Amino acid sequence: MFGRIDHIGVAVEDIDAAIALYRDSFGMELAHRETVESQGVEAVLLDVGEGHVELLAPLGPETPVGRYVAKNGAGLHHVAYAVDDIDATLEKLAGVGLQLIDSEARVGIRGSRVAFLHPRSTGGVLTEIVEPVGGH
């Protein structure tokens, strides 16, 4: 069902400090930086192997990532898996009884189509599925 791990999402308080850590200390190449207003984040993708680390800085305290950081602090936020057909994958996941946060895909970073699964039905891990655009 899942093609590969697309990215690991990391919630951060200071995106520039986080970029410095991942780029300068870990040697990861900064691939993309974008504000995703619909999700309330500034997001950065850094290349690691065939996947990415996605740094997520909340645009405000009442955004989903803002609430997450206030409750849990900075750190691992989600795991995202690449899929070829997000609509068919959502249908299959709902069919096996998993709780969907998003019953329909929405637009994510770099125009990808994304949807989240509730951690209550995925062993406590916020899970994202991603249908990348243009092979990203």
Image (cartoon, grey):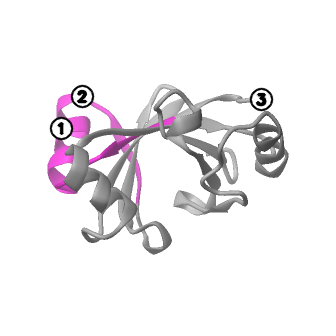
Q: Nearer the viewer, residue 79 or 49?
A: 79
Q: Is residue 133 magenta?
A: no
Up/down of 61 relative to 3, above or below:
below
How far across and down, in percent of the image, does residue 74 sit? 22, 44
Q: If the image is split into quadrants, where does the N terminus sit?
A: top right
How far is the residue under mark 1 from the one under mark 2? 7 Å
The amino acid at mark 3 is: Met
Taking the spot 68% from the left edge, 54% from the top edge, the residue there is: 133
Which is nearer the N-term, disc 1 or disc 2?
Answer: 1
Instruction: Write down the region rendered in magenta.
Output: 7-33
Secondary structure state at the residue bearing disc 3:
loop
Q: Nearer the viewer, residue 45 or 102?
A: 102
The amino acid at mark 1 is: Leu
Up/down of 50 relative to 101, above or below:
above
Q: Which residue is mark 3?
A: 1
Tell me the crowding category of disc 3: few under 14, some 14 to 19, or many 20 or more residues within 10 angstroms, Cα based: few
How far across and down, in percent of the image, does residue 117 sit? 60, 44
Taking the spot 83% from the left edge, 39% from the top edge, the residue there is: 95
Q: Which residue is mark 1?
A: 21
Point out which mark residue 87 bears. none
Taking the spot 47% from the left edge, 33% from the top edge, the residue there is: 125
- Looking at the rendered image, the disc whose residue lies closer to the viewer, 2 or 3, is 3
Which is nearer the N-term, disc 2 or disc 3?
Answer: 3
Asked which quadrant contains residue 5, the reply is: top right
Q: Which residue is mark 2?
A: 26
Classify residue 102 as left or right of residue 73: right
The amino acid at mark 2 is: Phe
How far is the residue under mark 3 from the one under mark 1? 33 Å
Secondary structure state at the residue bearing disc 1:
helix
